[in-house]
Image (cartoon, helix red, strand yellow):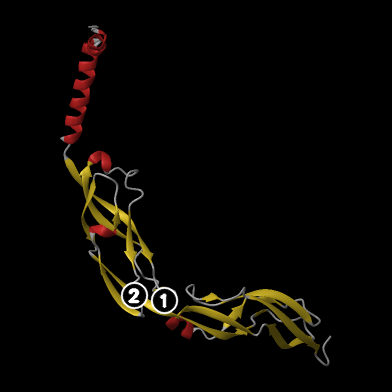
Amino acid sequence: MSNKPLRGLTRHLGWKLGALAVAILLWLILAGAPEVVALQSVPILYQNLHSGLVLAADAPGSLRAELRGAARNLTESSLSSVFVRLDLSSVDRPGEQTLTISSSEFNLPQGVTFLRAIPSQVRLQTFRIATKEVPVTVRLDGVPPDGYRIVQTDPSPDKLRISGPEPRVQSILTANTDLIDVRNLTQTTEVQTDAFVDDPRVQFESPPVVRVRLILEKIRGGH
């Protein structure tokens, strides 16, 4: 019977045994590597909030997590994709909500375990989304030349619809235009400008572009 299979197994036996020994040694070193603890800032992702609700502006965007693992698993690059996923599907009405952070909310790489979150709870305030129309207020920069005056400003549209957290929407009384320079106007003019509201959490339902007709008249006795 041929001994070729046996010779194949025993060929370069020293190299093969050496490679096996190195592999075992590396495994023992890695398996026996001491674990360390790291504090990592982790972003919070809010999911499944009902379409008629919005979070308050002070909702936390991140928290600090205490994580354990081998040092090679707790590098900046390996933890760069870690985040906390908070499911808000149970929040169906405006008000205060307290969510307790657990390991199930974390997206962690292999070999890393969750110890605790700082803070351990997240308190949220939700508001109902409201809409309403507000009048447009035309803002003028300067006055026309001597002998002329503006007798009327007609914005079109004269109202704009806004939306946002209900308390903030209710506090908005008007949408203001950007300043319109009238210092060189000597005849009735129509200009296009943008409008804004004084709250970054409130938005317009349509582009806030306003055309303003500035009606001038000559003052009797003016030059």
In the image: residue 94, left or right of residue 139: left
Q: Which residue appears farthest toward the front when viewing the image? A: 1
Q: SS class of the residue under badge 2?
A: loop
Q: Which residue appears farthest toward the bottom when viewing the image? A: 220
- Residue count near mark 1 (Cα–Cα under 10 Å), binned few <14, some 14–19, many ≥20: many
Residue at 68% across, 79% down: 142
* Residue 17's disc number: none
Classify the position of the C terminus by image quarter: bottom right
Q: Three-letter amino acid code at disc 2?
A: Val
Classify the position of the N terminus by image quarter: top left
Residue 169 location, x and y as percent?
A: 48, 82
Q: Residue 174 appears in which quarter of the rendering?
A: bottom right
Residue at 83% across, 93% down: 220
Sequence-wise first label, 1 or 2: 1
In the image: residue 114, left or right of residue 76: left
Q: Are marks 1 and 2 in contact (CB under 8 Å)?
A: yes
Residue 99 location, x and y as percent?
A: 27, 69
Between the residue at mark 1 and the residue at mark 2, the CA separation in whole angstroms equals 9 Å
Residue denoted by label 2 = 91
Residue 8 location, x and y as percent?
A: 26, 11
Q: Residue 159 appears in which quarter of the rendering?
A: bottom right
Residue at 74% across, 83% down: 214
Q: Three-letter amino acid code at disc 1?
A: Leu
- Closest to the observer, 44 or 158: 44
Residue at 19% across, 21% down: 21
Q: Residue 64 appears in which quarter of the rendering?
A: bottom left
- Closest to the observer, 129 or 64: 129
Residue denoted by label 1 = 53
